[in-house]
Amino acid sequence: MKEIESWKDIEGFKGRYSVSNLGRVRSNFRIKGPRKTIKTNTIILKQGISNSGYSRVNLHSDGKQRCYSVHRLVAKAFIPNPEAKPQTNHKNGIKTDNRLENLEWATRSENQRHRYNELGKKGGQMRMVIDLHTGIYYESVTELSNNLGVKMKTLYRRMRYGQTYCQYKIIYDE
């Protein structure tokens, strides 16, 4: 069954751009120019990929060009965020799948937990520490260090390269 595409204006662009529930961005029909009347057609904008693998699009406002993450544009337009969560999570882990049904607002912790527990992804830059026995997450090695009364240096040495210290393990980004 084919999904119906719906469009909403992107906030802050006075109707110049819209984003769809399928993750597409378009430049809307408008008449440009204070002295000259130029009609522009509605066109779907080409998306690029950022160094971190997310879909990006260039939007223009007040003579300036700026790059925006497509998943953030879709989430801001279609998903209410009453808890003011700062990140957008891709439920299936595919960074270029910007369909509304694949996105949700999340805190950094929720995003990392989803990545580790649901998608089984590890490696890269350190983000959080998990207690493997209780399932409790710590935002950083500093927080764990303060809780245990153990020096951070000791924890880093023991937990690097995916090893555990007692029942604690660092969760990494790719």
Image: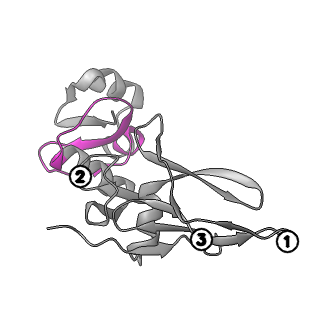
Of 65 and 125, nearer the camera is 65
Sequence order check: which comes first, mark 2 or mark 3?
Answer: 3
Disc assigned to residue 7? none
SS class, disc 1:
loop
Q: How many marks?
A: 3
> Quick check: is 6 in the magenta stretch?
no
The image's colouring method is one colour
As drawn, 135 above or below 104 = above
Tell me if mark 3 has few (under 14), some (14-19) or many (20+) residues whose alpha carbon lies within 10 angstroms of its own.
Answer: some
Where residue 94 appears, as percent x and y from the top left, is 27, 46
Please say whether residue 71 is visible from this viewpoint: yes
As drawn, 42 above or below 120 = below
Tell me if mark 1 has few (under 14), some (14-19) or many (20+) residues whose alpha carbon lies within 10 angstroms of its own.
Answer: few
Q: Quadrant of residue 39?
A: bottom right
Q: Quadrant of the C terminus?
A: top left
**What amino acid type should be assigned to the residue bearing mark 2?**
His
How many angstroms separate mark 2 from mark 1 (CA)? 50 Å
SS class, disc 2:
helix
SS class, disc 3:
loop
Q: Which residue is mark 2?
A: 114
Q: Is residue 133 left or right of residue 102?
A: left
Q: Which residues are magenta?
A: 117-145
Q: Residue at x 30, y 48 (%)?
A: 112
Where residue 113 appears, as percent x and y from the top left, is 25, 50
Q: Residue at x 22, y 51 (%)?
A: 92
How many angstroms separate mark 3 from mark 1 (CA)? 16 Å
Q: Which residue is mark 3?
A: 29
Q: Which residue is mark 1?
A: 34
Q: Quadrant of the N terminus?
A: bottom left
Sequence order check: which comes first, mark 2 or mark 1?
Answer: 1
